[in-house]
Amino acid sequence: MTESSRPESPAPLAVVERPSAAIAVVRLNRPEVRNALDLQIRKDLAVIFRRFADDVDLRCVVLTGGDTCFAAGADIEDMSRIDAVQMYQRHTERLWAAVADCPVPVISAVCGYALGGGLELAMNTDIILAGEGARLGQPEIRVGIMPGAGGTQRLVRAVGKFQAMYLCMTGNLVTAQEAYNMGLVSKVVPDDEVNTQALKLAEQLAAMPPIALKQIKEVIVHGADAPLGAALALERKAVQLLFATEDKQEGMTAFLEKRKPNYQGR
């Protein structure tokens, strides 16, 4: 086979860019199917996010689908071919856990559609920025199934029983503003600014004390389902831990000296 006739390698399903050592941008890369989430792209995302867990320089991650669509849901053609045992054996909950368990803040930059598995993916992150034209929802009911990657459970924790029931039972989509009003997204921005604003926010977070950021994430995530007393104890222990860090001393000294702090993650 000649060099010119050699088949090209397929494009990666998820692309990682590093604007700086402190920030990673992960872009879903199946534009021809609006970033539909088949098993392979989920596996690729899991590999990427598991590597992030060991990246000592990383401070924040931006997850995006690009400028036109975040992720329009699971790959229906793929799912139509499998049965219950095959669905069980995929153990996709382990793949999504790699995203949810990322120790640094993860920002979803949502342009266009975030539907079904796409919305569930976004809900595994920590902050959701949505463009004004974005549409979000859990339309699985319309193809005879239901959310199966945390949609029912994360939704009810984010927006309450009645909104979660509405979204999951009707399959109706909501606008970015409606999602913001019900507490499903963090902020709504102009469509052409979503990725820029997400990167700007990532830079802001990357300048914060890293250990404090990780402790905030850990306490909010694990405290949400704990009894209030246990959650408050978890919070107190995290604060006490931070008083042993060099960053605590740097932050308070910089405040008193009226200068910008330089956090080192120690």
Image: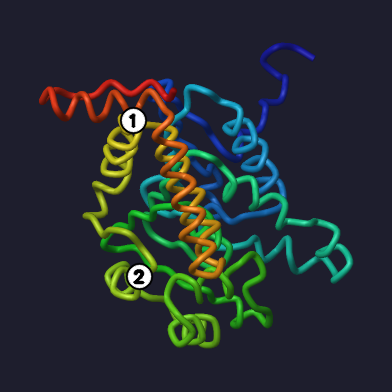
- How many neighbours does mark 1 have within 10 angstroms: few (below 14), some (14-19), or many (20 or more)? some
Q: State the residue lying farthest toward the left.
A: 258
Query: For the residue marked with disc 2, what is the amino acid?
Result: Gly
Q: Give me the residue at 53% from left, 56% from top.
A: 124
Q: Position of residue 8 (x, y in %)?
A: 66, 26
Of residues 177 and 142, the one drawn nearer to the viewer in this rendering = 177
Disc 2 element: loop
Residue that appears at 32% across and 33% down: 208
Query: Which residue is rendered at x = 71% and y = 46% of the image?
Result: 40
Task: Give x and y (percent) for residue 22.
Answer: 41, 25
Find the distance from the CA under tag 2 to the CA under tag 1.
31 Å
> What element does badge 1 sit on?
helix
- Label 2 or label 1, whichever comes before in sequence order: 2
Q: Which residue is mark 1?
A: 248
How crowded pointer 2 is (Cα within 10 Å; few <14, some 14-19, many 20+) is rated as some
What is the x, y in percent for residue 47? 67, 36
Locate the C terminus by quadrant.
top left
**In this view, 198 is above or below 232:** above
User: Mark 2 or 1, which is nearer the eye?
Assistant: 1
Q: Amino acid at mark 1?
A: Lys
- Nearer-the-camera pick, 204 or 66: 204
Q: Is residue 34 left or right of residue 95?
A: left
User: Residue 131 appears in which quarter of the rendering?
Assistant: bottom left
Residue carrying label 2: 183
Image vertical order of residue 168 relative to residue 136, above or below: below
